[in-house]
Image (cartoon, helix red, strand yellow):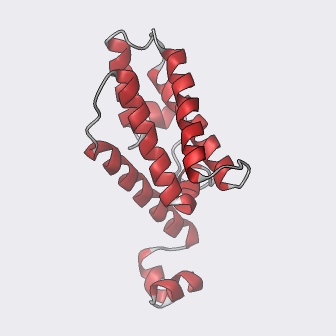
Amino acid sequence: MRRVADVVRITPMAIYRHFPDRAALLNAVADEGFIALADSVRKRRFRGPAEDRLAQMIEIYLDFSLKNPRQFELMFLTKRQGARRFPKDFKEGRSPTANLMAELIQQGMDAGVFRNDDAWEITFEMGALSHGMIMVYLGGRIDASPAAFRALYRRTFQRYIRGILR
């Protein structure tokens, strides 16, 4: 907490007035990330067929992760109290980011573009695929420039999306 206070140029006690401990501060940082990511998705006007709109949405996750790698890791991969858990929290609509993707997938199913399946499971699978690829890349395990990684990421999701087409 002292290092955080030094960085933001306040006293450690000022932080403790708002957050009882480090875990609460980290949860707030993660929550702000989810709000920002969901806002980015909501602001975007998706165009084209359902599979193109889904690919456009996935691209927003990639952009966010590459601009905010540590926050992305905290949001999706760091074990923390109060983090949403699949399937209960997701199916109850508690995920500001997954809700939007599940809605798009369900619309595609309803329109006959995607085969009928569990929209929440597909949403979770796509998230896991996205998070896994991003973290392996950020961890230095993919030898590629950002542009080459972005192309690999897109190809991977095109293959996945083709697999759920009707």
Q: How many marks?
A: 0
Residue at image coords 58%, 84%: 3
Left or right, 136 with respect to 120, comes to: right
Percent x, y of residue 123: 48, 30
Percent x, y of residue 137: 65, 50
Percent x, y of residue 37: 39, 51
Q: Can you say which quadrant of the picture contains the N terminus?
A: bottom right
Residue at image coords 55%, 48%: 147
Residue at image coords 46%, 45%: 61
Residue 166 at least partly seen: yes
Nearest the viewer among 2 and 106 is 106
Residue at the extreme right of the image, as rendered: 141
Nearest the viewer among 4 and 42 is 42
Left or right, 107 with respect to 1, comes to: left
Measured along the vertical axis of the image, is residue 164 above or below residue 6?
A: above
Measured along the vertical axis of the image, is residue 43 above or below residue 114?
A: below
Q: Can you say which quadrant of the picture contains the C terminus?
A: top left
Percent x, y of residue 110: 33, 13
Measured along the vertical axis of the image, is residue 115 above or below residue 24?
A: above
Residue 87 at least partly seen: no
Measured along the vertical axis of the image, is residue 115 above or below residue 54?
A: above
Nearest the viewer among 143 and 77 is 143
